[in-house]
Image (cartoon, rainbow, N blue to C red):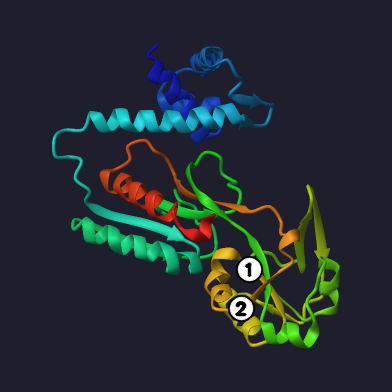
Amino acid sequence: MDRLDELQILVAILDTGSMAAAARKLGRSPAAVTRELGVLETRAGARLLERSTRRLTPTEAGLRLAEQARRLLADYEAALLPAGADTPRGLLRIAAPNVFGRRHVAPVVTRFLAAQPEVQVELLLSDRNVDLIEEGVDAAVRIGPLANLSLVARRLGQVSRVTVACPDYLARRGTPSTPLELAGHELIMSTSVRSVAEWRFRQGKREHVVRYSPRLRVNDVEAMLAAAIDGFGIARALSYQVEPLLRAGLLVRLLPAYEPEPLPVHLVLPSSRHMPPRLRAFVDVAVAQLGTLDVLC
């Protein structure tokens, strides 16, 4: 069997979630798919998938090889395109979180459009994770751990969860030095991520979950930060959301020694197979420009 076919089998298993589904997709027998996966694992010198009666889970080696395999297969398919077929054209649908999308993705999109006159972009801003395949989205910015391991992911950087308050509030009420001291303060909590009134903190390598009784709950991050700037109380947001406010002195960063592990930021795609030239061009531009943002370090 061609070694590219071995890589194609691994990618198909991850995309479909099972060897049987991968076999149907590739038009091969389940036995052949299982056999060739074993050959690939022997060649790689590592177990690529953990098998159980209910599911297949890629190992770290499997994820790493799959990412490289997707790129190799996409490059191979691109090399077979007829002359002139690699001109970016057509519609792209890009999704991103509200604030991050407005501040950082929209400028990348407009610069990309200026350089690609035959491409159109629909930019979808929402704080929910859209289903790329069901909703016909070509690429999306995701903040936090990736739940769907079959997606193609390009890491852009990471962001921190930052606790903040305005200088006037701290002058009136004092500055907390530990997470437990927050219980004596007015707290503003976002309900856009989780409904439970809790914040997670880290002390050394240990994570602590602390629950509070907030005076104010808001389902919009900008309204939450506006209340904090107005001096109502202490809020928590992602670092890219508050970075300009911290720089302007409107808010102060609190408890930096207790901040939890940073959250990864990725550009995700449903697949790298048959990637149209317009998407390939956008990915190259987006990774280059978003990956250099100061807020993603």
Indicate the quadrant containing the C terminus: top left, top right, bottom left or bottom right: bottom right
Task: Name the side, left or right, on which 227 lies relative to 63.
Answer: right
The residue sitting at 46% across, 23% down in the picture is 9
Nearest to N terminus: mark 1 or mark 2: 2
Closer-to-camera residue (190/91): 190
Closer-to-camera residue (206/193): 206
State whether residue 150 is above or below residue 38: below
- Is disc 1 in contact with disc 2, using a CB cutoff of under 8 Å? yes
Indicate the quadrant containing the N terminus: top left, top right, bottom left or bottom right: top left
Closer-to-camera residue (41/110): 110
Amino acid type at image mark 1: Ala
Quarter where residue 180 is shown: bottom right
The residues tagged by marks 1 and 2 sit, at their Cα atoms, a distance apart of: 8 Å
Quarter where residue 69 is shown: top left
Q: Give me the disc on residue 225.
A: 2
State whether residue 108 is above or below residue 72: below
Quarter where residue 175 is shown: bottom right
Q: Residue furthest left?
A: 83
The residue sitting at 32% across, 47% down in the picture is 279
Q: Position of residue 57 (x, y in %)?
A: 62, 32
How packed mark 2 is, by other alpha carbons closer than 10 Å (few <14, some 14-19, many 20 or more), is many
State whether residue 274 is above or below residue 296: above
Task: Name the element at disc 1.
Answer: strand
Q: Position of residue 94 (x, y in %)?
A: 39, 57
Count of picture labels: 2
Task: Name the element at disc 2.
Answer: helix
Residue at the spot of label 1: 237
The residue sitting at 69% across, 87% down in the picture is 168
Q: Position of residue 291 (x, y in %)?
A: 45, 51
Amino acid type at image mark 2: Leu
